[in-house]
Image: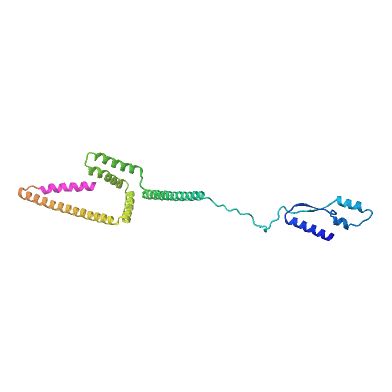
């Protein structure tokens, strides 16, 4: 009977443990009538039974607060951030604005870089025009003065004269006072002409060649006319001498000799 009571107590303790009961489980002993009946009767029996009835045994069982029916996971807790639709729209607008700003900044930076390259090329080209032998200080001053003087004299003239005379005067003074620099500038102008407008360059060179040929022919015709005029004058002088007997040829011969001597002296 004692074994049965102990088995029942053990089963009750296990049942409380499974139900999640925590704390101390009080187990009473010698309180049932069966235990009292089964106890031996001796002279000291009543006092011993009374002492056992007043002092119950306490069985303490340490149990967790709540038993879990799932297995414990060893990995940490991961929180997933799910943005709201407003946050998604704000992010989209911000990315578009950043893209526009980056594109505009790149475009402006590209324009500035191209302009800086143009400035450097122009500066290096202007420096390449200068000839170290020719002084620029008085020559450029004289060139500007000649262009200003031409513009002043052309104020009362017609519109084509006022438009063409100052730049022609400037170019003439520039070629006269700075011939080496003018030659370099002309070579660069011909290079640009051949690069961008080759047809215009061909027309210009053809016109210059025809102009030179016309000048040569004009000079030849002037020399021929001078010779014909001298022959006509000689025939007229000979006729006068034969008709009048005056020695006009000696007079013209003396004058020609004096002119030749003057040229030799000069």
Q: Is residue 85 left or right of residue 47?
A: left
Q: Is residue 249 magenta?
A: yes
Q: Where is the N terminus found, in terms of image quarters?
A: bottom right
Q: Nearer the viewer, residue 195 or 98?
A: 98
Measured as percent of width and height from the top left, residue 7 is found at 80, 60
Q: Residue lying furthest right in this view?
A: 43
Q: Which residue is located at x 28 percent, y 42 percent?
A: 147
Q: Which span of residues is magenta-colored? A: 248-266
| Position in image of residue 112 (x %, y %) | 42, 48
Q: Residue at x 15, y 52 (%)?
A: 225
Q: State the residue at coordinates (83%, 60%).
A: 3
The majority secondary structure of the magenta stretch comes to helix
Q: How is the image coloured?
A: rainbow
Q: How many numbered circles does the render carry? A: 0
Say whether residue 243 is magenta.
Answer: no
Based on the displayed image, in which of its 4 quarters is residue 10 positioned?
bottom right
- Farthest residue in the left direction? 243
The percent position of residue 150, horizontal first and vertical second, equals 26, 41
- 199 horizontally vs 223: left or right: right
58 or 213: nearer the eye?
58
């Amino acid at each position: 009977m004692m074994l049965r009571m102990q088995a029942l107590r053990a089963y009750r303790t296990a049942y409380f443990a499974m139900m999640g009961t925590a704390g101390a489980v009080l187990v009473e002993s010698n309180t049932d009538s069966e235990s009292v009946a089964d106890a031996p009767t001796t002279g000291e029996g009543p006092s011993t039974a009374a002492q056992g009835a007043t002092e119950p045994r306490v069985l303490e069982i340490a149990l967790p607060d709540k038993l879990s029916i799932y297995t414990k996971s060893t990995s940490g807790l991961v929180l997933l951030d799910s943005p709201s639709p407003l946050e998604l729209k704000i992010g989209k607008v911000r990315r578009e604005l950043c893209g526009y700003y980056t594109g505009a900044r790149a475009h402006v930076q590209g324009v500035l870089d191209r302009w800086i390259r143009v400035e450097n090329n122009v500066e290096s080209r202007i420096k390449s025009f200068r000839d170290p032998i020719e002084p620029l200080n008085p020559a450029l001053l004289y060139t500007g003065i000649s262009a200003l003087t031409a513009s002043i004299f052309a104020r009362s003239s017609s519109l084509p004269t006022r438009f063409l005379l100052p730049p022609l005067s400037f170019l003439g003074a520039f070629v006269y006072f700075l011939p080496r620099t003018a030659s370099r500038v002309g070579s660069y102008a011909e290079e640009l002409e051949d690069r961008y407008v080759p047809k215009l360059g061909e027309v210009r060179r053809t016109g210059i060649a025809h102009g030179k040929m016309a000048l040569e022919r004009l000079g030849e015709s002037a020399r021929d006319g001078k010779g014909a005029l001298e022959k006509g004058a000689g025939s007229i002088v000979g006729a006068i001498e034969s008709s009048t007997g005056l020695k006009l040829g000696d007079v013209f011969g003396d004058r020609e000799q004096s002119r030749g001597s003057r040229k030799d002296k000069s």
